[in-house]
Image (cartoon, grey):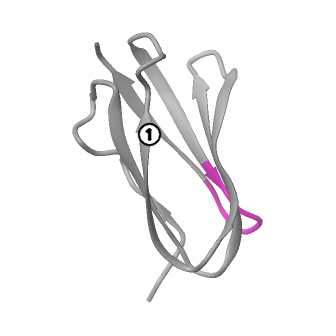
Amino acid sequence: MITFCLEINYFSNPFNSNTIIEFELAVISNVKLELYDVLGRKLRTIISNELQAGRHQFRFDAADLPSGIYFYVLSTNKFIESKKMMLIK
């Protein structure tokens, strides 16, 4: 059974410059995947598209960001979840 699910990023956490963010959608959804700093400031929108149900992976390139803790938030009209990741350069 497919559900809504946001996975912990991988290629390790902490990561250095690139990581993979993976999530699963139960139904076709308008999806936003956004990145925030520890102060809650939105730094960028990684994804803002309608996506089919199923598992999705996106490579996130953080080469232009300083080392630190970041939060990525997946939101649809039926689901919202956030995860923490640590960038170490």
Left or right of 83? Residue 33 is: right
- Quadrant for the C terminus in the image: top left
> Start and end of the magenta stretch?
74-80
Instruction: Find residue 8 and report its horizontal and vertical position in percent.
Output: 36, 48
Q: How many marks?
A: 1
Up the image or down, 11 lies above or below 55; here it is above
Residue at horizontal 41 percent and vertical 21 percent from the top: 63
Instruction: Find residue 60 and report its horizontal and vertical position in percent.
Output: 44, 39
Left or right of 87? Residue 11 is: left
Up the image or down, 40 lies above or below 77; here it is above
- Quadrant for the N terminus in the image: bottom left
Within 10 Å of disc 1 (Cα), the crowding (few <14, some 14-19, many 20+) is few
Up the image or down, 73 lies above or below 43; here it is below
Instruction: Find residue 48 and report its horizontal and vertical position in percent.
Output: 70, 53
Please identify the quarter of the rendering in which residue 15 is found: top left
Magenta stretch: residue 14 in it? no
Element at badge 1? strand
Up the image or down, 66 lies above or below 10; here it is above
Please identify the quarter of the rendering in which residue 14 is found: top left
Which residue is situated farthest in the left direction here?
A: 12
Instruction: Find residue 79 and report its horizontal and vertical position in percent.
Output: 66, 63
Q: Which residue is mark 1?
A: 60
Type of amino acid at the residue the image marks with label 1: Phe
Residue at horizontal 48 percent and vertical 65 percent from the top: 5
Which residue is situated farthest in the bottom direction here?
A: 1
> Which is nearer the eye, 53 or 8?
53
Residue at horizontal 23 percent and vertical 42 percent from the top: 11
